[in-house]
Amino acid sequence: MPGIRDWIGEPLYFVSSYLDQFSADQYREKTLNFFTKNITSTEESKQWIPSFNSTPLDNIKCNSLVRFRCMVQDMFGPELYYDVFDTENTATGERKLLTGRYQDVTSENENLNILHNSPVTKMSERHVFYCVPIPGETEWVKQGHQAMCMAPDVSCSSAPSQGFKRSLEDDVGEEMELQATDDSSKRSRSAPATEGSSVVTSQVQMNFPLPGETGPAALVKMYDDVGDKMKINDVIEVYGVISLDPSLVPVHTEDSEMLSAEEHKAHNPPPSLVPRIHAIYVNKIQTSNPLLPASIDNSSQELAAIKTEACEIRENLLGLLEHALHGDKLCAEYMLLHLLSSVYMRRDTIAVGKFSLNITGVNANEQLLVNSLVELIQQFVATSYYLPMSLDNLNKLKFTPVKDYDSDRLVSGVLQLPNRCHLILDETVMQPGQLDVAGVKNLEALGNLVRWQKVKYDFKYSNPEFETDVPVICLSEGKSLLNFDSTVPLQIENSLNLKSRLEAIKTYLSPALLDKIRIYLTLIPRLNYEISEEMTQMAQEDFVKTRQANKDAMTPEDFQSLLVVSRLLSLSCGLSNLSADVWAKAKVLEECRKSRLPK
């Protein structure tokens, strides 16, 4: 009976063994079932698999199983490989079936010859994705995942076999020549490797969306129909075989397929910088919060538990936000609702559920307030990004991803963010000056994100829109340059020193409470919510009566905003239905907020 260290340390042995035991058609299903069962049997079994996010590459064994928590940043073309290939030992005449599944390189006897024309030899396609660490993932999330890792460091120092070694894509190339096919759309996206290939020394563009971010990137190769289900910006956890062989860095020659030199370099980075991971099991992540399972449904025990504590956690969180906002309870209420907002459906062009927030009255000299709010948000949520809206940033940063046709690659931008990444805009750093053409485009892109929850990518000849779910909050002195769903002017309630308030927050915010808040902010937005017919009728009657008394007292837009506030207010209390009490409280909140706005 294989132990956990066996199938983690030598996964390709088990792939080959299943091919030996079963037919070429059966081994795929048997292999997949074996690994899926072992990987998903318990949370503990997952933690034994080395994390590619936090384990130094020198401590990862070549061709071992790793897991990678990442975002799909780009999609490359399909790649041809030998799923099963018939071989003959030229010295003994022995025939043997081998597989190129979950690997780039074969390491076998030098007398081994691939029988390209054998009826058993079969080529297939695998999808190739460029994946990066989850943009904006906060430090507590990274540390939480790292703390759970049980895998010992396993050095990659074991020498590779001294026998015959070549890239499987070389052999694909040979067969393509033998078949003299002109079907270039089916050609491998990787050029053949040759012995003595020089290592690519030019700087590799890691293509992280956010400036200053670090971490490992990988080319993730997916099999069968798994890749068909992936989209740009999907957040996934990949369990697969890591390939680090230096022979995967080929020299570009005139014979290197149909790729340009730029495209070839972009699609074949050195494996020492961008390893290949052959995905065996892929899970789309609903949350990267290490306190919770990666996948959660509405009947989960975690969700049921947090509902019972929701009111208590809400009051604690409200108090912390109030302290950080100079004692402004109204502002704290709206910030709490904003943190719980998410797009839960789309109706025509409207992203239903979004609740972007502009807190005004924050002076340029209130940097301590800004820093404390940013720090607090980053302590609470799993992903966030703080973007100072300086003239320099607006003019020089690349906000929207751009398709580079020379390298056939999507060059990332700041707004290529995963869903539920909280974007914090700081307009207090703005200085007088002129926006250039790039700055105007960046501001327009931000406006589209705030209003429509969409980002237009620049594909030169078209601008496809990518839907997002990125909660946006803006801190500004006056009204923001952008149109937000709700604007709340900050009012300092008393003169207690902000530093004293922040010290009080640190004292009050125990590790246990912090964990509860993190779970609360992750799970509460997932609650199902509905309005009964009775409450719908009551809300509509309220709207009509208010309009009859004063037509300007409530516009249709005001009514829509009230519905959003009442929904978030209900969810914040762990309620799945709107009640008369919550509706009344939502009206009071909106009236107080509007009373602060300039007439």
Image (spheres, grey):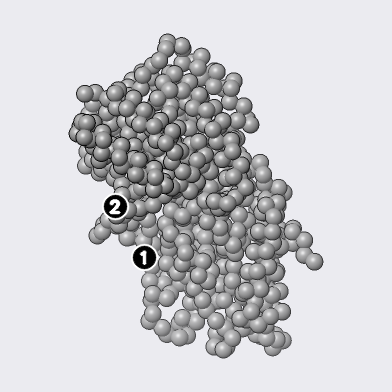
Residue 265 or 377: which is nearer the viewer? 377
The image quarter in which residue 246 lies: bottom right
In the rendered structure, the answer to whether residue 294 lies left or right of residue 2 reads left
Residue at 35%, 40% (x, y): give it.
Answer: 538
Q: Which residue is mark 2?
A: 349
Residue depth check, mark 1 versus mark 2: number of the one nearer the observer: 2
Residue at 48%, 44% (x, y): give it.
Answer: 576
Residue 103 x %, y %: 59, 67
Query: From this viewpoint, is residue 396 visible?
Result: no
Residue at 43%, 41% (x, y): give it.
Answer: 578
Q: Which residue is mark 1?
A: 260
Residue type marked 2: Thr
Residue type marked 1: Ser
In the picture as drawn, the residue positioned furthest to the top comes out as 495
Residue 377 or 590: which is nearer the viewer? 590
Residue 559 vertical position relative to residue 478 in the rendered view, above or below: below
Residue 442 x %, y %: 28, 42
Residue at 42%, 70% (x, y): give it.
Answer: 256
Residue 80 x %, y %: 49, 73
The disc label shown at residue 506, or none = none
Residue 440 or 211: which is nearer the viewer? 440
The image quarter in which residue 184 lies: bottom left
- Quadrant that contains the C terminus: top left
Q: Residues within 10 Å of mark 2 (few under 14, many from 20)?
A: few
- Quadrant that contains the N terminus: bottom right
In whole angstroms, how far apart are the C-alphas of marks 1 and 2? 39 Å
